Amino acid sequence: MWEQIRDNQVRSVILVTALGIMLLLLGSFLGQTLLGDWSFGLILALLIWIVMTLVGYFQGDSILLSLSKARKIGPDDMPRIYNVVEEMKIASGLEKMPDIYIVDDPALNAFATGRDKKHASLAVTSGLLQKLTRDELQGVVGHEMAHIRNRDVLLMALCSVLLGTIVIIAWYGSRVLFFTGGTRRSSSGGGGAQIIILLAAIAFMILAPIMAQFIYLAISRKREYLADASSALYTRYPEGLASALEKIAASTEQLKSVNSATAPMFIINPFRKSGRVAEDLSSTHPPISERIRILRAMAGNVSLADYEAAYNQAHKGGGSIIPHSSLVSGDITAQRDEVSTAVTPAEKERAREASDVLWKLHKYREITCNCGLKFKIPPDFHGDSFTCPRCNTAHRL
């Protein structure tokens, strides 16, 4: 997959440059409109671009994980997800195990982030851990591992930080222009020219984030198809990811900690109408039903060539999705059977498993009464004792 990695490195440079140019234009326009000196705004925007690119490279993953309110877990906290990630780490050929995070949210979703294979993290929601079987969870993790291996995570981290910067500057810039009306009068047109400049500035403040978003989305949906194909190859069970995508799309839960800058990171577009399932129409991801149809069209052997054939069938010969070198290199394996349901805990047990980890991460204390009742004591509980409602036993803390 070296072609895809090289392609993503080139795209990273092009995309960061394109977003940087948008930031420079925005800074120049604000400098000219507010101070009458475009060079000052240009220099300031250039400094911001350099700083935010460095921040995005070295701290972008930490920022995105923090925005998502993700909490790091270890192998003893939840062995099931840890074992699945370890299996996919071996299957994908990654040298280092990515850090695992859990997001306390009933919505079903997942994402990966980081600057390279040795500094990568994978985050899953508690809702995903509760609803998915082992095969389905393996398919999702395999998809995210492909993003790590293909260096998609660096591209998304850089772009998320830069796009967020453009949106913030444009928002505050438009407010300043709106309330001050600009501080400079045009020397050539008096009040009429000032009004035209002000209106143009406000229009640019509004359009800049939109244009930046289009540039951001120009990364192409191809990376999602390629990650799906890689997941099928790693797991040798395309139905696992297909079934997972089906469940995630059918969920009506809206992910709480998400914005337009971070949405493309997730395996499925996290935005949806209240109480509605996910829709095929999405600017950040390929159609869900199409992704599922392609995965289920793979039959017999599992290889990137099989995925390519299924993709072309769905698109009626609509071009290549897999790098040529990967198609001719083999990687053909037989599909495996579904994992026995006895291996996967029941949904009720999975829900208890996820909730226990979240209680622990939030530093709740667990006390078991002699009558069998278990109590979760929040860290901010200030009482010295409490009484069991079943047997009236007093428990000192």
Image (cartoon, helix red, strand yellow):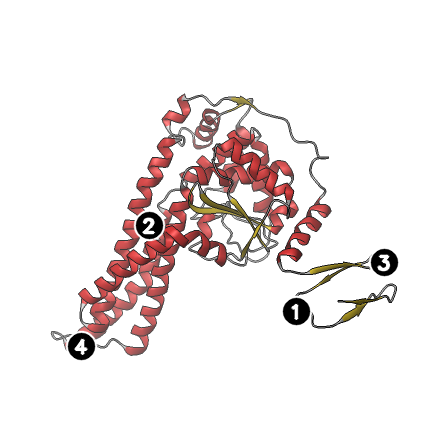
C-beta proximity under 8 Å, tags 4 and 2:
no
Whole-angstrom CA distance, mark 3 to mark 4, is 80 Å
Mark 3, Cα crowd under 10 Å, few <14 / some 14-19 / many 20+, is: few
Q: Which mark is residue 380?
A: 1
Q: Work out whether 45 lies above or below 100.
A: below
* Residue of label 3: 370
Q: Is residue 54 left or right of residue 287?
A: left
Q: Position of residue 381 (x, y in %)?
A: 69, 69
Of 302 and 74, nearer the camera is: 74
Whole-angstrom CA distance, mark 3 to mark 2, is 62 Å
Of mark 3 and mark 2, the one earlier in the sequence is 2
Q: Position of residue 112 (x, y in %)?
A: 48, 46
- What residue is drawn where x is 31% and y is 47%? 15
Of mark 4 and mark 1, the one earlier in the sequence is 4
Q: Amino acid at mark 1?
A: Asp
Q: Is residue 370 left or right of residue 213?
A: right
Mark 1, Cα crowd under 10 Å, few <14 / some 14-19 / many 20+, is: few
Res. 242 in view? no
Q: Give the foreground label among 4 and 1.
A: 1
Q: Give the foreground label among 3 and 2.
A: 3
Whole-angstrom CA distance, mark 3 to mark 1, is 24 Å
* Residue of label 4: 185
Of mark 3 and mark 1, the one earlier in the sequence is 3
Q: Amino acid at mark 4?
A: Arg
Residue at the right extreme of this rendering = 391
Q: Amino acid at mark 2?
A: Ile
Q: Position of residue 369 (x, y in %)?
A: 82, 59
* Residue of label 2: 215
Mark 4, Cα crowd under 10 Å, few <14 / some 14-19 / many 20+, is: many
- Determine whether the residue tagged by mark 4 lies in a helix, strand or loop: loop
Mark 2, Cα crowd under 10 Å, few <14 / some 14-19 / many 20+, is: some
